[in-house]
């Protein structure tokens, strides 16, 4: 009797009856099943198949179950096993994963080393995120996919307008689901989820865990009468537990307050959200053909303490640099501050005495238009401009009881002064002279790069700084 035993590891490539039969007849003594990979259900099918064949062939084939060694099973937030303080060693920013290398954006600078879950999300660590997901779901990726579906991320929204994209989240039983699929899925690849679906999910986080269908039309009316109303539809009444929701909301607030998404924040209110930076696949050519395009995004909500608005900004751009926090986050911040400013509810102590005369601060520009608006608002005007049919450009200043309008002449071949004007008037006036205009900032024009009185050279670019 020989003492050497032939041990064969059984996996998807060799678990058919034909292949197992051939291996047994060729001398296999032990069938090894690696429980670090695959599900228990899949291994049970293999065990039953091996038992059946060894009985048919009358061969003493042993079955060896290679289980995973001792480990700390932290689990997910929802399971109550992963906490925001759970630590992952991301090393030098590079981690081998099934023949490929997962990298953080700063790998060439030595990586981040040890990070908590909160810090992983704050700095968008690919290594930290993918390690956690692969560590806890690698042996059962279906559980991860089921978790996404439980939160309704895979569901079409059935919007009121045509042309919506449909989410596509593959499962482990589908074609091309490889070992690398799960870790790369965890950082946004291997899936297709439209931006409005992502926004709907974040809106659910802001809305105490309740996701609702986006609504563009509240009601249809005919001849002043409501003929049909469209009520708010709940997609998912509870995407997670209150404990998990509180943890995630605190993390998303810190991503903006302390992480790489600081440009999305505001000095007026707190913002919560998450950045995203991804390469865009070139279809069948993949990610490695021609110039790489990127999709940078930021999705979040505000104010953090009592959310009222949610928003996503997605920008497609060619080549590097590409930063979701700096690029999309900055746009998010500017839009959010304008939206919030329009919704301010000022205290009654700031109310103006109805007996006082309110004199507004009027921008320089086309005086006839300014005069028309002031008269419509029943505000006194001094230095009235005659309606000659020609444009009249000038300045304004406030007097105790009126707005004073002062016209000024603009010589045909000289650069005019646009200091004090709004962007619309300034651009119009300069372009009418044959100049090109570059705007920096918002508000009134504070300076112009080509001085007033300079001879016009058509095609020149004037940079206007507004504040």
Image: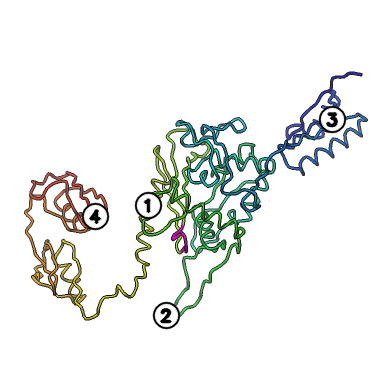
Q: Are marks 1 and 4 in contact (CB under 8 Å)?
A: no
Mark 3: secondary structure: helix
Q: Is residue 209 left or right of residue 5?
A: left
Q: CA distance from mark 3 to mark 2?
A: 78 Å
- Kindly report which numbered mark, 4 or 3, lies closer to the viewer in this rendering: 4
- Kindly report which numbered mark, 2 or 1, lies closer to the viewer in this rendering: 1
| Disc 4 packing (10 Å; few <14; some 14–19; many ≥20) | few
Instruction: Specify start and end residues of the magenta stretch as a single range.
Output: 301-307
Mark 4: secondary structure: loop
Mark 4 sits on what residue?
467
Which residue is rendered at x = 18% and y = 62% of the image? 363
Mark 3 sits on what residue?
21
Q: Position of residue 29 (x, y in %)?
A: 85, 26
Q: CA distance from mark 4 to mark 2?
A: 43 Å
- Kindly report which numbered mark, 1 or 4, lies closer to the viewer in this rendering: 4
Between 202 and 428, which is closer to the camera in this rendering? 202
Mark 1 sits on what residue?
331
Q: Quadrant of residue 248?
A: bottom right
Q: How is the image coloured?
A: rainbow
Circle nearer the N terminus (1, 3): 3
Circle nearer the N terminus (3, 2): 3
Q: Position of residue 465 (x, y in %)?
A: 22, 50
Q: Is residue 200 left or right of residue 17?
A: left
Residue 224 - label = 2
| Disc 1 packing (10 Å; few <14; some 14–19; many ≥20) | some
Q: Position of residue 360 (x, y in %)?
A: 20, 69
Q: CA distance from mark 1 to mark 4?
A: 17 Å
Circle nearer the N terminus (2, 1): 2
**In this figure, what is the number of numbered marks?**
4
113 shown above or below 458: above
| Disc 3 packing (10 Å; few <14; some 14–19; many ≥20) | some
Circle nearer the N terminus (4, 3): 3
């Amino acid at each position: 009797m020989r003492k050497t035993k032939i041990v064969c590891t059984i996996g998807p490539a060799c678990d058919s009856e034909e292949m197992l039969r051939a291996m047994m007849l060729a001398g296999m003594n032990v069938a090894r099943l690696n429980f670090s990979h695959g599900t228990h259900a899949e291994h049970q099918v293999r065990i039953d198949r091996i038992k059946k064949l060894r009985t048919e062939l009358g061969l003493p084939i042993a079955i060896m179950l290679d289980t995973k060694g001792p480990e700390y099973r932290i689990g997910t937030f929802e399971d109550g096993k992963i906490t925001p303080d759970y630590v992952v060693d991301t090393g030098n920013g590079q981690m081998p994963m099934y023949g490929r290398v997962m990298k953080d954006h700063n790998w060439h600078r030595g990586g981040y080393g040890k990070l908590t879950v909160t810090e992983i999300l704050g700095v968008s660590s690919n290594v930290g995120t993918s390690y956690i997901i692969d560590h806890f779901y690698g042996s059962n990726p279906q559980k991860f996919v089921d978790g996404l579906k439980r939160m309704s991320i895979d569901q079409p929204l059935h919007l009121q307008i045509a042309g919506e994209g449909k989410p596509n989240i593959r499962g482990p039983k589908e074609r091309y689901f490889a070992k690398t699929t799960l870790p790369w899925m965890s950082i946004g690849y291997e899936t297709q989820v439209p931006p409005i679906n992502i926004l709907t999910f974040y809106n659910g986080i802001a809305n105490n865990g309740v996701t609702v269908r986006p609504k563009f039309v509240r009601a249809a009316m005919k001849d002043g009468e409501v003929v049909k109303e469209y009520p708010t539809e709940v997609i998912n009444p509870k995407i997670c537990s209150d404990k998990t929701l509180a943890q995630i909301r605190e993390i998303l607030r810190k991503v903006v307050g302390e992480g790489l998404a600081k440009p999305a924040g505001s000095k007026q209110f707190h913002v919560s959200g998450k950045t995203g930076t991804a390469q865009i696949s070139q279809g069948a050519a993949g990610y490695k053909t021609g110039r790489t395009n990127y999709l940078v995004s930021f999705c979040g909500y505000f104010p953090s303490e009592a959310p009222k608005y949610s928003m996503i900004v997605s920008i497609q751009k060619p080549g590097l640099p590409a930063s979701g926090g700096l690029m999309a986050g900055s746009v998010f911040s500017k839009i959010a501050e304008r939206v919030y400013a329009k919704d301010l509810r000022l205290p009654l102590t700031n109310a103006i005495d109805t007996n006082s005369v309110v004199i507004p601060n009027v921008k320089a520009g086309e005086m006839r238009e300014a005069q028309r608006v002031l008269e419509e608002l029943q505000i006194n005007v001094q230095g009235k401009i005659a309606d000659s049919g020609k444009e009249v450009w000038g300045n304004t200043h406030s007097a105790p009881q009126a707005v004073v309008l002062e016209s000024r002449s603009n010589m045909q071949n000289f650069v005019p002064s646009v200091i004090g004007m709004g962007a619309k008037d300034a651009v119009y006036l300069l372009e009418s002279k044959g100049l090109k205009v570059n705007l920096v900032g918002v508000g009134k024009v504070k300076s112009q790069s080509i001085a007033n009185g300079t001879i016009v050279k058509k095609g020149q670019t004037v940079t206007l700084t507004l504040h």
